Amino acid sequence: MDQWRATGARGEAVLFDMLDGLPVRNVFGVSDPDVHRIGDRWVMFLGGFTTRLRVSLFAAALPPGAPLSDDRWALLTDPRRPRRAVPL
């Protein structure tokens, strides 16, 4: 168990977990989110450590109109390759 889970993170949603794996294949993990409202949706910009052992900037978004408290964040992916996050 990692320190974050062991020190009382109960009730907090884990959105992108390196231990459980990400829904994409080209990124090992993401961190340092910066969240903004753009139009009618929330967008999160994140640094991500890629399978090429480089750090790139990625984005995740909630569905249009969803509140910030929603946990349906999804990394933005290539429409032709939905298991590949698109670097910005």
Image (tube, helix red, strand yellow):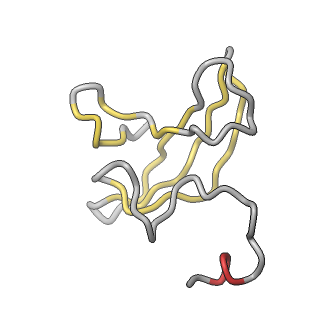
User: Does 70 appear above or below 31?
Assistant: above
Query: Horizontal placement of 22 versus 73: left or right?
Result: left
Look at 47% across and 43% down and name the residue there.
Answer: 58
Farthest-out residue, top: 39
Farthest-out residue, front: 11
The residue closer to the viewer here, 50 or 4, is: 4
Query: Horizontal placement of 47 versus 85: left or right?
Result: right
Q: Where, by quadrant of the figure, is residue 6 drawn?
A: bottom right
Query: Whole-percent x and y of residue 85?
Result: 36, 42
Look at 39% across and 41% down and name the residue there.
Answer: 87
The residue closer to the viewer here, 56 or 1, is: 1
The residue closer to the viewer here, 20 or 61, is: 20
Query: Whole-percent x and y of residue 24?
Result: 33, 48
Look at 50% across and 62% down and name the residue there.
Answer: 17
Query: Whole-percent x and y of residue 8?
Result: 77, 77
Please identify the quadrant where the C terminus is shown.
top left
User: Does 12 appear above or below 65?
Assistant: below
Please identify the quadrant where the N terminus is shown.
bottom right
Q: How many numbered dots are placed on residues in this image?
A: 0
Query: Whole-percent x and y of residue 14?
Result: 61, 58
Query: Horizontal placement of 72 versus 74: left or right?
Result: right
User: Does 35 appear above or below 4?
Assistant: above
